[in-house]
Image (spheres, rainbow, N blue to C red):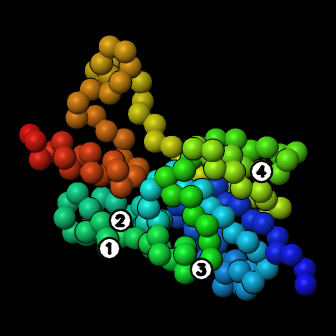
Amino acid sequence: MRARSKLVVIGNGMAGARVVEEILARGGGDHLDIAMFGEEPYGNYNRILLSDVPNGSHQESEIFLNPLSWYTENGIRLHAGVRAIEILRHARQVVGTGGVVEDYDHLIIATGSVPFIPPMAGLTVEGGGEKPGVFAFRSLDDCRRITNYALTK
């Protein structure tokens, strides 16, 4: 019996999870040992619906596409809350925070985007951090920070 190839996916957001869903739908789960690194500590969610969380039209639980249990049910090792910090190409390994190491035969990098706050006067405090009330809006944690801030004002 031939050994299963090792697939590592960096990024468990919408793009990373979607490619894994497609691989599983095409029978790839029978041929691949799949591991994923996800910087956020939970499964993937619909970022398009993020604005519905602070405005109250959706609960956080309603925007999840694949909760943590989905990864386990599909035999995927999800390193939730673990940032991939190094790719050792010659060793064919991905290294994550906390010393997590995964070997790979195939590697998919689906890290998505990073929010950008333009360097405009008045947005930052001395030292470079954002002033209170200035937020990036890209993640569920951003929604929580915005909501918590709004509730204190």
Mark 3: amino acid? Asn
- Say the numbered circle drawn on residue 145: none
Residue designated by label 1: 62
| Residue drawn at x 86%, y 75% as measured from the top left | 3
Element type at mark 2: helix
Say whether residue 15 is visible.
no
| Disc 3: which residue | 74
Residue that label 2 marks: 49
Residue at 51%, 58% in the rendered image: 80
SS for callout 3: loop
Left or right: 70 in relation to 91: left
- Where is the N terminus found, in terms of image quarters? bottom right
Q: Residue furthest top?
A: 126
Of mark 1 and mark 4, the one earlier in the sequence is 1
Kindly identify the amino acid type of the residue bearing the numbered disc 2: Leu
Furthest toward the left, the residue is 153
Where disc 1 sits, the SS reads: helix
User: How far apart are labels 2 and 3 at the CA level?
Assistant: 25 Å
- Let me know if residue 82 appears in the view: yes
Query: Farthest residue toward the right?
Result: 1
Q: Earlier in the sequence, mark 1 or mark 3?
A: 1
Indicate which disc, 3 or 4, sits on the residue closer to the N terminus: 3
Quarter residue 123 falls in: top left
Which quadrant holds the C terminus? top left
Left or right: where does residue 92 sit relative to residue 12? right
For marks 1 and 3, give the CA distance.
Answer: 21 Å
Residue 47 appears at what percent x and percent y? 42, 61
Cβ–Cβ below 8 Å for labels 3 and 4? no
Marks 1 and 2 sit apart, C-alpha to C-alpha, by 9 Å
Check contact, mark 1 vs mark 2: CB within 8 A: yes
Mark before the other along the chain sequence, 2 or 4? 2
